[in-house]
Image (cartoon, grey):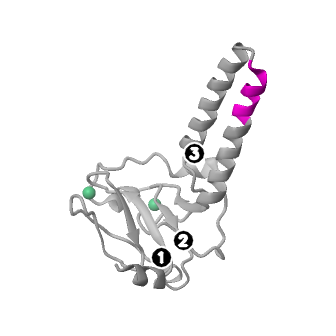
């Protein structure tokens, strides 16, 4: 796509998911219903609702048809935790070396860094069951925050064991 065409089409609603066969992360533009893994050629069926196609509102997962999704920061939770853990270790060492001010400074900088990343990266809608991620969706939809009880309800999920993931998930 040329740069001009890219700016014209504005940011398209996309879904990101691991390929059901080779686990390669795929980001797919949802204006196209056909999803084919660029790595292994696996066809993945998508279930695009009218509301999603017309308004860009994500009400259910297009990959596994899970009826519930949640909204979270686009900052990967594990990455945020890694930054916090690293800052704790460094400041602990600095405390041990009697560098109290520096130790506090490390904690403040790490918190600020997480906050800035959080602001900069924006939000993402996720599926409870298959953890597909949606970006550039219509913000006017209702997107509840993460609910651990719902996560447990839709788990466990064994990906990569069936050729057609939807077939396995429908049993729940
Ligand atoms: Zn693949
Ligand atoms: Zn899903």
Dot 1 falls on a residue whose secondary structure is loop
Q: Which mark is residue 119?
A: none
Tell which circle, 1 or 3, labels the residue nearer the N-terminal end.
Answer: 1
Looking at the image, residue 48 sits to the left or right of residue 106; the answer is left
- Mark 1 close to ligand 2, CB under 8 Å: no
Other-residue count near label 2 (Cα within 10 Å), few / some / many at <14 / 14–19 / ≥20: some
Q: Quadrant of residue 44?
A: bottom left
In this rendering, does residue 23 appear at all?
yes
Magenta-drawn stretch contains 118: no
Residue under pointer 2: 136
- Mark 3 close to ligand 2, CB under 8 Å: no
Q: Nearer the viewer, residue 145 or 158?
A: 145
Magenta-drawn stretch contains 106: yes
Is the residue 45 above or below the residue 118 in the image? below
Label 1 – label 3 distance at C-alpha: 24 Å
Q: Residue at x 47, y 55 (%)?
A: 131
Q: Nearer the viewer, residue 39 or 42?
A: 39
Residue under pointer 3: 77
Task: Report if the CB atoms under discs 1 and 2 are less than 8 Å apart.
Answer: yes
Q: Residue at x 25, y 63 (%)?
A: 38
- Mark 2 close to ligand 2, CB under 8 Å: no
Residue under pointer 1: 12
What span is in magenta?
99-107
Q: Residue furthest right?
A: 101
- Give the image location of residue 6, x and y in percent: 43, 79
In this rendering, does residue 170 appear at all?
no
Task: Report if the CB atoms under discs 1 and 3 are less than 8 Å apart.
Answer: no
Q: Residue furthest left?
A: 40
């Amino acid at each position: 796509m040329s740069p001009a065409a890219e700016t014209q089409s504005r940011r398209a609603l996309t879904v990101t998911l691991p390929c059901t066969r080779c686990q390669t992360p795929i980001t797919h533009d949802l204006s196209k219903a056909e999803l084919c893994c660029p790595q292994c050629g696996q066809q993945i069926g998508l279930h695009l609702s009218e509301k999603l196609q017309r308004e860009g509102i994500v009400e259910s997962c297009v990959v596994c048809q899970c009826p519930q999704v949640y909204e979270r920061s686009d900052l990967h939770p594990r990455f945020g935790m890694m930054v916090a853990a690293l800052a704790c270790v460094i400041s602990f060492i600095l405390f041990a070396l009697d560098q109290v001010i520096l130790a506090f400074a490390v904690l403040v900088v790490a918190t600020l860094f997480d906050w800035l990343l959080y602001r900069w990266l924006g939000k993402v809608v996720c599926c409870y069951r298959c953890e597909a991620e949606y970006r550039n969706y219509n913000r006017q939809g209702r997107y509840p925050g993460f609910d651990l009880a719902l996560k447990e309800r839709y788990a466990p999920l064994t990906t990569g064991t069936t050729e057609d993931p939807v077939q396995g998930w429908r049993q729940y």
